[in-house]
Amino acid sequence: MVCSPCPFLLMDQHTPQPERARGLQMARSMCWHCQSEVTGEYFCDRCVKVQPVSKETDYFTCFGVPRRLLLDPQKLETKFYELSRSFHPDFYQTKSPAEQTISLSNAAVLNTAYRTLRDPIQRAEYLLALETGSVKDIRTSPPADLFEEILELQDTLEEYRASDRDSDQGHRLRATLQTEQEALERRKHAMEAQLQQLFADWDQLQDAGEATSLARVERDRILKQMRDLLSHRTYINNIVNDLAATIS
Amino acid sequence: MAYSDKVVDHFNNPRNMGSFKKDDADVGTGMVGAPECGDVMKLQIKVQNDTIVDAKFKTFGCGSAIASSSLATEWLKGKTIEEAQKIKNTDIVQELNLPPVKIHCSVLAEDAIKAALADYQKKTDGQPTGTK
């Protein structure tokens, strides 16, 4: 068994560590094979055996990037290919079963990590979960107006589904729904622009790395607003997709 | 993943779909949403003498969310406020045979019940109900 201390405890998350990324110590642990200390990323310095990604390792750490929201997609992709190669099954065919298992499960973690970090929205959701524990901990006040609107639209949608599409009523309902869809899409884009601003605010705050109470207040504000916007966006996204699927 | 027969039944024949006037004094409205999946649920109760005489719902979401709220309205009818407080999401999970990935739908339904009861109680707060 590899006994690895939690990397969260080892990393000071509030100090900026931009270019240290590459040599990031992901799990200062013992090599499962030669028992020497592992300080590299995924391979033991001494016996060069592949090391398992610890369960506590977050996706940002996996990719050796700081916990920021405006990541460079190009750099992320390059790193993904680089790591994918190093865990590729082709290179483990002649290795021991233990190494094959480790490389395979590392590749699986890496894929999930990449899929999460590649998408700005999923990345933000993930960061929120990391920073605030379970997402439910900061359950937002439900946007009652938005809900009313969604349920009302739902009624119109039902009406349209039940109507004769070629009738006057069908045409009228379709036009109404189309207008609604466009309006909702505009709102979604406005929300995404707001999110983008919050992402920048977050990164700036992290880069400043201050541990003042003011910084803490600002941190909580950003996370809370991000949580609100992300969930409102999900609600709107769902109904937009439903609208699009029905009237297309 | 296949839905259980009960979920399919509630989905195809939802009970008590619709709404009451939310400003009526004898109506309690619970409006909840799950930010994780974007489901939205509105559940309303009509109360007379501390007993829920009618319940209605409207849900925008997946089959399990619709079934959970449909079942909840069925269960609510005829119950006293106190009895209604005791409905747990696990009861819904059991009745509908919901798989683990759909448990949050039953949680949403329980939240909706709690919110509707709280809304009704807020409306009647300060007004003697005559009983108890």
Image (spheres, coloured by chain):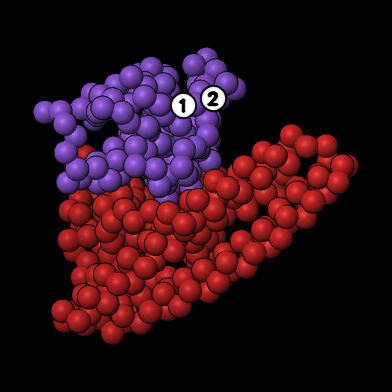
Which element carries disc 2, helix, strand or loop? Answer: loop
Q: Chain ID for label 2? A: B
Residue linked to disc 2: B14
Residue B126 spot, x, y in % from top left: 17, 46
Front one among B123 and A196: B123
- The hue used for chain B is purple
Image position, residue A125 (x, y; %): 41, 58
Alpha carbons under labels 2 and 1: distance apart:
6 Å
In terms of image quadrants, where is residue A24? bottom left
Q: Is residue B26 left or right of residue B49?
A: right
Quadrant of res A96: top left
* B108 is higher (above) or lower (below) than A235: above
Residue B124 shows up from this direction: yes
Report whether mark 2 lies on the same chain as mark 1: yes
Residue A156 position in % (x across, y down): 66, 45
Chain letter for the red colouring in the rendering: A
Q: Residue furthest bottom?
A: A208
Give me the chain letter of mark 1.
Answer: B
What is the x, y in percent for residue B27? 37, 38
Q: Determine which of the numbered discs, if any, sits on residue A126 in the image.
A: none
A27 lies above or below A23 = above
Q: Secondary structure at mark 1?
A: helix
Q: Amino acid at mark 1?
A: Ser
* Amino acid identity at mark 2: Pro
Q: Disc 2 vs disc 1: Cβ atoms closer than 8 Å?
A: yes
User: Residue at the location (68% across, 62% down)?
Assistant: A182
Q: Which mark is residue B70?
A: 1
Q: Kindly identify the residue that appears in the image at 79 percent across and 51 percent down.
A: A172
Is the C terminus of chain B in the top left, top right, bottom left or bottom right quadrant? top left
